[in-house]
Amino acid sequence: MRYNDDDLELRESEDLYSETRNRRFLAKEDVGDGLIGTIRQAGRAKIDFGGYGETEEHTVILWKEDIKPFICNATNAWEISQIAGSTDSRKWVDVHVELYHEKKVPFGGKIVGGIRVRRPGTGPSSKITPVVAQPPPARKPTTGTRKRKP
């Protein structure tokens, strides 16, 4: 028996795996040709990527604009500290940074691309997507329990 799939219109993807993942955090596919964000808060947070209760501590940037939280690696944290003039994350508040997709970022011994940070207006791209500051969407109340994947 064959399922009726005649009404499905599939869109091809260069990176179907990344698009398939339910991304809670900013990914290279989200920044397009570049976007400018204003830091609302920066700090360390324990993040459970797998949903199994195993957390890892990461540097996370929250934005005043409607942009997903950004897990910031050491390279990007250093660049933000240079833009802000301080390594103190409390002094990063209200700092504007441009996030862009750099194709030559290595990860796990391979060149996979990733997000990089720079001072706005210093990059080669003039096609920056302006982001209008909006309050983040209201969050649904949680019950405190989360089903774990088998």
Image (spheres, rainbow, N blue to C red):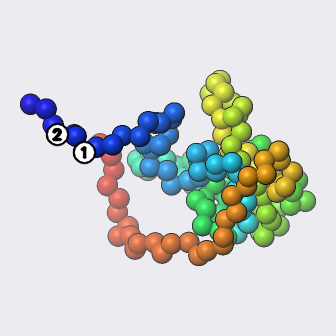
Q: Residues within 10 Å of mark 2 (few under 14, many from 20)?
A: few
- Looking at the rendered structure, the kind of residue marked 1 is Asp
State how far apart marks 1 and 2 are (Cα).
8 Å
| 45 or 39, nearer to the observer | 39
Q: Residue at x 78, y 47 (%)?
A: 125
51 sits to left or right of 69? left
42 sits to left or right of 118? left
Look at the picture and state if 137 lies above or below 80. below
| 29 or 90, nearer to the observer | 29
Horizontal and vertical percent position of residue 99: 72, 52
Q: Which residue is mark 2?
A: 4
130 sits to left or right of 9? right
Identify the mark at residue 7; answer none if there is no mark.
Answer: 1
- Looking at the rendered structure, the kind of residue marked 2 is Asn
Residue most extreme to the right: 85
**Mark 1 in CB contact with mark 2 (< 8 angstroms):** yes
Q: Residue at x 62, y 27 (%)?
A: 108
Q: Residue at x 16, y 40 (%)?
A: 4
Q: In this orientation, does residue 130 appear?
A: yes
Horizontal and vertical percent position of residue 150: 29, 42
| 124 or 80, nearer to the observer | 124
